[in-house]
Image: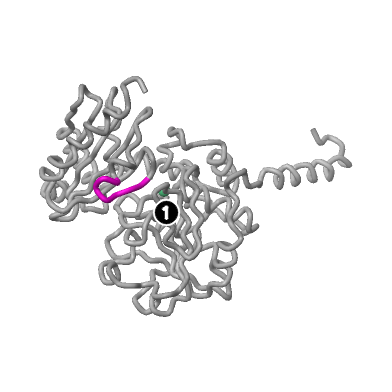
Amino acid sequence: MCEKPGALGVCFMVLVSVKQEKLFVPHGREVPADVTEMLRAMRTPVVMSHVVPDADALGSMIGVALAMASPTCVPKISLPEGSVSQRLRFLVDGGPTPPVATAEDFAAADGFVALDTAKKPRCNVGPALKDADWSSGRPIVNIDHHTSNTLFGDTNWVVGEACSTCEMVYYMLVAEQRPIDARIASLLFAGIQTDTIGFSLPTAGAPAFQAAAALTAAGADVGDLGERLCRSQTKSEFDLLRVIYANTRTAANGQLAYSSATHDEISSAGCTAADIDDQINVPRSLDGARLAILFTEGTQGQTRMNFRGAGAVTVVELAGEFGGGGHSQAAGAILDGGVEEAMRQVLPAAEAHLKKFPSGS
Ligand SMILES: [Mn+2]
């Protein structure tokens, strides 16, 4: 292409302009001006995500905190002891991560950034602050892609069509012309990769692939992330999966698939509440299942339900019946009591809910 020495300069310019051209924000992913302004005004923010943080929560939280850090802004992250799963620990430890906020940091913060969190009580602020008015009048910027988001921030940027919060954060950094280094690229890629289950959900639209391609070009370590996220089960996670497979049942002619793990089963496997998340994919993967539910008693006396819908079946309304929320086809809720009790309440409601979606839809 560039055999003539004189053509080198031209070639270089073409490459540079192509690179710049690629970095555009697609329609529907524009960050509102008040979000940008509020973030810019913060000097000592605490950046947080949801309880039982997944890769999207951790990636967007650490990514935003790293991107905000400057000589005039010192962000801390909210990550209470024991809240990160064994599998995702590497996202926190695998590179520079802003310091974890102490109680003093919460008190001294001049604002808060909540990522991937649908409602304020789900913010991962730890047991001491959970029921307290931890923001007490200071601004909250709320950035999320859950359709059930309650808009609890002082400014809210919620894009239900975005595949992940990490996708939104990527476009925010592009709009802001903030540099994206390899660490931030890997964190954001991890959220996009996992929230789309390896780019296999309908939420993986062109903006997701565009962001993923640019993050790969910016240094996201796709192979390492794949190895750690998809092919690195610890023995205890593996043992828990064995339980989930063994406990899987079907109802409604196979259209409803569900499984469970009691508190004893979870701790006997060597796992904790923090390790429960994508095991819902076990009942969800059964051929013919249009609605999948996972019941887990990670915290003694509380049963968490993960709901997934396939085809035309949405589940956010079903989760809402039990005080939960989420995305249209991936949602959750928590009930007091053990697994058996939760099943008694939820399974009949799930069968009734399924009837709203004629088979074949
Ligand atoms: Mn998410």
Amino acid type, label 1: Asp
x then y, percent, for residue 186: 49, 50
Residue at point 65% right, 57% down? 177
**Neighbour tally class for label 1: few under 14, some 14-19, many 20 plus, Cα within 10 Å:** many
Position of 74 with respect to 257 (left or right) is right
In the image, which residues are magenta? 320-326
User: Where does the N terminus fall, quadrant-wise?
Assistant: top right
- Give the x, y percent position of residue 182: 54, 53
- Is 323 one of the magenta-colored residues? yes
User: From the viewer's perspective, is 6 left or right of 163?
Assistant: right
Residue 84 visible from this viewpoint: yes
9 up-or-down from 355: above or below:
below
Q: Which residue is mark 1?
A: 116
For label 1, the SS is loop
Q: Residue furthest top?
A: 360
Quarter of the image where one finds residue 28: top right
Image x and y of residue 73, in percent: 54, 73
Q: Is the CB–ligand 1 distance for label 1 below 8 Å?
A: yes
Above or below: residue 45 compared with residue 6? below
Q: Nearer the viewer, residue 280 or 94?
A: 280
Is residue 270 shown to the viewer in this render? no
At a point 18% along the width and 49% down the height, the residue shown is: 303
Q: Is residue 1 magenta?
A: no
Which residue extends farthest right?
Answer: 6
Q: Nearer the viewer, residue 52 or 225?
A: 52
Left-right relation of 168 to 263: right
